[in-house]
Image: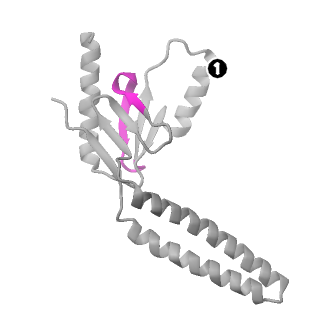
């Protein structure tokens, strides 16, 4: 019996920490711009402008991330009978269970690691490139779970069950 599909959503409670930090970065930006405009010292002006730039970059990045997390109502990752689908990208892709040779949840790193079945038409160079990518990323496909609300035991159980069901279907020739 296959488990229920798992829908992983972004953690919205992290906004509690992100929003005050974004406001702090806005205050730092305003403070840096103020001191850069009133300072007569070139070194102090340069340092204040650098601090303003860093505050803008960090605050803008976190602010955008917080806004996306607040607006996002749809699941980010779906684990169901068809495979694992990552919906966070502009072009969502699904890795089917039949294409997976091995699937593993690394809860320490917060990722799902997938090793794909070898392709029959891969050239020698393609095999080397895939092996290097697999070595670097620890898998052919990596689904990051950072920032997503999830239960590792539930995901681990579902991954094993869905992958085993796909292997059974493949052996039966369905």
Question: What SS does tag 1 mark?
Answer: helix
Q: How many marks?
A: 1
Which image quadrant for residue 26? bottom right
- Tell me: 80 left or right of 145: left
Of residue 60 and residue 172, the one placed in the foreground of this image is: 60
Of residue 72 and residue 2, the one placed in the foreground of this image is: 72
- Tell me: 102 left or right of 140: left
Q: Which residue is pictured at 52% across the width and 39% down the height?
A: 137
Of residue 117 and residue 18, the one placed in the foreground of this image is: 18
Q: Which stretch appears magenta?
A: 94-110
Protein image colouring: one colour
Q: Which residue is pictured at 42% across the width and 37% down the height?
A: 113
**Classed neighbour count for the residue bearing mark 1: other residues with Cα under 10 Å, few (<14), some (14–19), many (≥20):** few
Above or below residue 52? Residue 145 is above
Q: Is residue 99 magenta?
A: yes
Above or below residue 143? Residue 101 is above
Which image quadrant for residue 162? top left
Q: Which residue is pictured at 35% across the width and 65% down the height?
A: 13
Whole-percent x, y for residue 102 in the image:
37, 28
Task: Name the quadrant of the N terminus.
Answer: top left
Which image quadrant for residue 80? top left
Task: Name the quadrant of the C terminus.
Answer: top left
Above or below residue 54? Residue 73 is above
Single out the residue that lies furthest toward the left.
1
Whole-percent x, y for residue 25 in the image:
57, 75
Q: Is residue 119 magenta?
A: no
Q: Which residue is mark 1?
A: 125
Whole-percent x, y for residue 107 in the image:
36, 48
Whole-percent x, y for residue 101 in the image:
39, 24
- Tell me: 75 left or right of 34: left
Q: Which residue is pictured at 55% across the width and 27% down the height?
A: 131
């Amino acid at each position: 019996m296959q488990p229920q599909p798992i829908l992983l959503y972004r953690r919205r409670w992290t906004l509690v920490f992100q929003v005050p930090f974004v406001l702090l970065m806005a205050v730092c930006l305003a403070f840096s711009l103020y001191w850069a405009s009133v300072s007569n010292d070139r070194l102090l002006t340069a340092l204040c402008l650098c601090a303003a730039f860093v505050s803008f970059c960090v605050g803008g990045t976190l602010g955008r991330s917080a806004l996306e997390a607040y607006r996002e109502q749809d699941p980010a990752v779906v684990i169901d009978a068809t495979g694992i689908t990552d919906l966070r990208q502009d072009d969502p892709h699904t890795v089917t269970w039949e294409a997976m040779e091995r699937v593993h949840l690394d809860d320490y790193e917060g990722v799902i690691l997938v090793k794909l079945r070898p392709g029959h038409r891969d050239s020698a160079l393609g095999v080397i490139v895939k092996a290097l990518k697999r070595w670097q990323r620890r898998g052919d496909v990596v689904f990051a779970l950072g920032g997503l609300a999830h239960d590792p035991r539930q995901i681990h159980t579902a991954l094993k069950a869905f992958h085993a069901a796909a292997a059974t279907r493949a052996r039966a020739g369905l």
